[in-house]
Image (tube, rainbow, N blue to C red):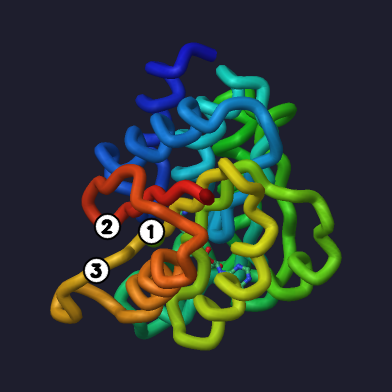
Amino acid sequence: MRREEIFARARVTKGFMPEDEGLALYGAGCARGAGTWLEIGAWCGKSALYLGAAAQETGAVLYSLDHHHGSEENQAGWEHFDPELVDPVDGRLNTLPSWQRTIADAQLEETVIGLVGPSSIVAAHFAQPLDLLFIDGGHGQAVAWDDYRNWVPKVVVGGTLAIHDVFENPAEGGRPPYDIYCAALASGDFVDVATCGSLRVLGRR
Ligand code: SAH
Ligand code: MG
């Protein structure tokens, strides 16, 4: 499928990736080139379409990781709750069917591979170095720092680290994504490559 068609699908896919930031993510993927990529935070597949379009063009594979039960702010009574995504069998949020539909409709099933489970458990059993890592999972303090500690060391020298929902101004959003972005820079291992909205793209030196 042509990338324009994939982007058109992304526009109507549920999720939390504005189009300009999605296109910046696509650009970061194309700039990185073939290899093993992973995103933390799949939801219904919106960001996976942008990264998946780049992966398809470059010959990369994108692992799209999520336990598919949503973050805190997605639960009933919270800001980003969507009753259409509740599984009637157990009353829990389940975004996996929507994610599968998104990836299948975009004909990306051989490029975007789902990993279903808690991020920290998958990380402990995932030995493959990453050419690109996109962090957009849980934004709570504990989960964001676990993602930073467990996954960032897997990024190869010359690889790309992208982080979503980075807000310098605390009034615009939560701290943990901004804090791990600062930690990546302060480590001396990463430099800023691109910025779009709340998306930060860094490169490993
Ligand atoms: N990238 C998506 C948005 C992701 S929302 C888009 O483009 O729309 C954040 C996701 O992180 C949610 O789907 C939630 O289920 C997932 N998540 C939160 N904590 C997690 C954890 N510990 N392990 C795996 N997934 C997690
Ligand atoms: Mg996000």
Amino acid of disc 2: Ser
- Point 56% across, 54% down: residue: 42
Q: Which residue is mark 3?
A: 167
Q: Are marks 3 and 2 in contact (CB under 8 Å)?
A: yes
Q: Which residue is mark 2?
A: 198
Q: Are marks 1 and 3 in contact (CB under 8 Å)?
A: no
Q: Say if disc 1 is inside 8 Å of ligand 2.
A: yes
Locate residue 71, reporting x and y percent: 49, 75
Q: Secondary structure at mark 2?
A: loop
Locate residue 25, reporting x and y percent: 40, 39
Q: Are marks 2 and 1 in contact (CB under 8 Å)?
A: yes
Locate residue 13, reporting x and y percent: 41, 41
Q: Secondary structure at mark 1?
A: loop
- Point 40% across, 35% down: residue: 10
Instruction: Left or right? Give the position of 185 relative to 132.
Output: left
Amino acid of disc 1: His
